[in-house]
């Protein structure tokens, strides 16, 4: 059974008392934290309205091959990680072009509203003991992407995996400044499905291989054998967890409303002074 002390559920107004959260996750004292109401409901309504209207302005890329049960998942922008279609991640130049476009598209998406990139950055800063936070900048006046937006329609989720990607080509420059051995995962919920779409984590299996079973038809005994715990954040909530250490998946969404997330990764600088985040 999961020790309740390894999970935190915080309101955005209470972050001053939890400046050690990132250090506790890095030290494996905490598994997962949910920060409630990082984005306010009215802003979320407008952001999602604009996404419905301006979806085509973003660079949209499929994530999984046609034969995958999750082939309907769409990604707005390019993420510096493997996918079913790109097992070694995106090509570097392709990623840089997509990152620049995504930042511009997100700025337009949030015009006149709280900026999603800034909301994530300020929340991570509050949780990291006052470290500087930011997106890794590159010498050629380019930068990594702040995130991607992922859309999970009915029947689609994300298979079991750990967000640990040694020697990924797109991480070559990132490895020179950040400690990717303790990479964290985060996402902000934009819309939640009527049912499903939970984050499932094997909480007692640090650095273990990801299982291959579906979580939807497991008995209670089978869930206990897997050390399985589920998290179902609400729209506007930010989730941060030790995604490179613990196997996790996103359970399939059900209903007419797709699961939408603005998400990515984070890791401390090699000197410990900065917490980088990127998509």
Image (cartoon, rainbow, N blue to C red):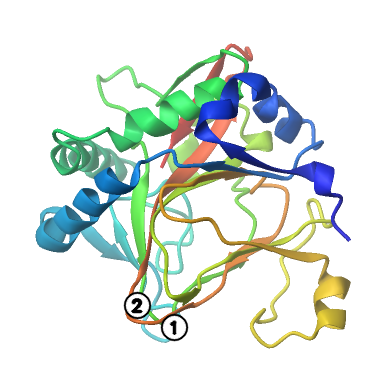
Q: Residue 248: x, y in percent? A: 65, 61
Between 211 and 130, the one nearer to me in the picture: 130
Gap between marks 2 and 1 measured at Cα: 8 Å
* Label 2–label 1 contact, CB within 8 A: yes
Q: Secondary structure at mark 1?
A: loop
72 sits left or right of 175 in the view = left
Between 24 and 235, the one nearer to me in the picture: 235
183 sits left or right of 121 in the view = right
Where is 158 relative to 123, above or below? below
Give the quarter of the image for residue 72.
bottom left
Give the quarter of the image for residue 2.
bottom right
Between 235 and 60, the one nearer to me in the picture: 235
Quarter the N terminus occupies: bottom right
> Which residue, given by chain and number where applicable, does mark 2 sit on?
72
> Which residue, given by chain and number where applicable, does mark 1 sit on?
155
Residue lying at 59% horizontally and 11% vertically, measured from the top left: 273
Where is 253 relative to 148, above or below? below
Estimate how packed mark 2 is, as few (under 14), some (14 to 19) or many (20 or more) residues with alpha carbons within 10 Å.
Answer: some
């Amino acid at each position: 059974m999961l020790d309740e002390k390894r999970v935190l559920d915080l309101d955005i107004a209470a972050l001053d008392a939890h400046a050690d959260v990132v250090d506790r996750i890095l030290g494996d004292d905490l598994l997962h934290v949910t920060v409630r109401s990082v984005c306010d409901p009215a802003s979320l309504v407008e952001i999602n309205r604009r996404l419905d209207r301006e979806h085509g302005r973003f660079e949209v890329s499929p994530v999984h091959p046609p034969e995958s049960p999750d082939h309907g998942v769409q990604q707005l922008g390019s993420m510096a990680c493997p996918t079913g279609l790109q097992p070694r991640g995106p090509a570097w130049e392709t990623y840089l072009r997509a990152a620049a476009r995504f930042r511009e598209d997100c700025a337009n998406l949030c015009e006149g509203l709280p900026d999603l990139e800034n909301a994530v950055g300020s929340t991570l800063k509050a949780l990291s003991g006052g470290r500087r936070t930011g997106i890794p900048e590159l010498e050629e006046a380019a930068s990594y992407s702040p995130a991607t937006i992922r859309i999970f329609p009915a029947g689609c989720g994300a298979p079991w995996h750990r967000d640990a990607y040694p020697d990924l080509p797109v991480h070559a420059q990132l490895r020179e400044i950040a400690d990717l051995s303790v990479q964290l995962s985060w996402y902000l919920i934009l819309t939640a499905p009527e049912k499903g779409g939970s984050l499932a984590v094997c909480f007692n299996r640090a650095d273990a291989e990801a299982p291959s079973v579906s979580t939807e038809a497991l008995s209670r005994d089978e869930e206990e054998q897997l050390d399985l715990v589920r998290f179902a954040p609400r729209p506007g909530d930010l989730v941060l967890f030790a995604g490179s250490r613990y196997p996790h998946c996103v359970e399939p969404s059900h209903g007419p409303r797709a699961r939408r997330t603005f998400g990515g990764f984070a890791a401390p600088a090699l000197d410990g002074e900065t917490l980088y985040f990127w998509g």
